[in-house]
Image (cartoon, helix red, strand yellow):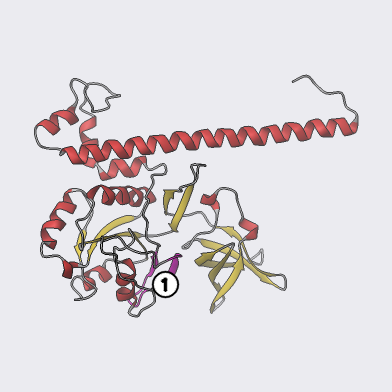
Amino acid sequence: MAEAGLLPGRVIRVDRGRCDVVIADGDTVATVHADTGPVSDPDPLRLPCTGDWAAVSTGPAGTFVQALLPRGTAVVRSTSSRRSEGQVLAANVDTVVIAASLAVEPDLARIERFLALAWESGAQPLIVLTKADLASDADQIRADVELAAPGVDVLVVSATTGRGMDVLAACLPGTTALIGQSGAGKSTIANALLGNAVMEVQQTRGDGKGRHTTTTRELLPLPGGGVLIDTPGLRGVGMFDSSDGVQQVFSEIEALTGDCRFADCTHVAEPGCAVLEALADGLVTQRRLDSYRKLLRENEWIASRTDARLRAERKKEWRAVVKGSQEARKIQGIPQKPM
């Protein structure tokens, strides 16, 4: 990198084709505004994202992100576009904190959906139940959430009273991405962790749903070490090639599938289905099984759409190559070969 005249840096914010990058030049560390033109790509998964490590060039012509280093982890969801594309929410994170408000009854299925994205990213999930000061049954709700999140720690916190905030701060080494629905209290928690009012906070609506206060993803240093990426509230959490994450979330169901009589068992009505037997015995709840089936179906659907889109794009690119070759042969007066 140094031989090519490039400087190492980390993307801390992206906004409309430009980004802020912290670069290191010897003993000097500075934040620069860089153009992302050299790494523009029609696939949004390859565009710069908060948390990316990058190679940056500086000079009279401007400052540019010339290349992105391979990502160690990436939190990806599907976009709402018709192209079945993925959107990277945060890159190179160590911990994904999933915030859920105790001001309303937590949606366990939505938490499982967030968990699938977190596990798929390669980072370690952590569930944080916020606004504990507004719930009299916080510990009971935590117990219910723990049943929906095997292998994941669940913390109960309140930024207002300070409950659990010291424990949360101690659980965030390295890079942490904070995700959750609008109104989950992410910005309030972020401000408490950062030690000052960095993120704008708005009142939650009367129905428990929040307003989008965080509109971009920004990487900010934590007082005790490490960095935090607060993401905008997500009202839609679509799967994007998250089969491994779904299997991790429903590990107790996945463990049973190997005992089914048929290898392609759908766990709906087949004889000898170990999952249905566990359901009848009360070892698996109907709610968990329904959520498992739904996320599997959604993930399979988006995967098929993505495969179809990639095949169509490759076909389009090949047609362009063939057409260009034919036009070149015409200019050179070379007879056309039959297709």
> Image point 58% across, 33% down: which residue?
312
> Image point 56% across, 76% down: which residue?
26
The x, y position of residue 25, in whole percent, is 58, 75
Above or below, 39 relative to 195 = above
Q: Residues within 10 Å of mark 1 (few under 14, many from 20)?
A: some
Q: Secondary structure at mark 1?
A: strand
The x, y position of residue 3, in whole percent, is 65, 64
* Left-right relation of 222 to 68: left
Is residue 216 located in the magenta-colored stretch of the structure? Answer: yes
Quadrant of the image containing the N terminus: bottom right
> Image point 69% across, 32% down: which residue?
319
| Residue tagged 1 | 220
> Image point 19% across, 56% down: which residue?
105
* Left-right relation of 26 to 264: right
Magenta-drawn segment: 215-230
Above or below, 248 relative to 320 = below
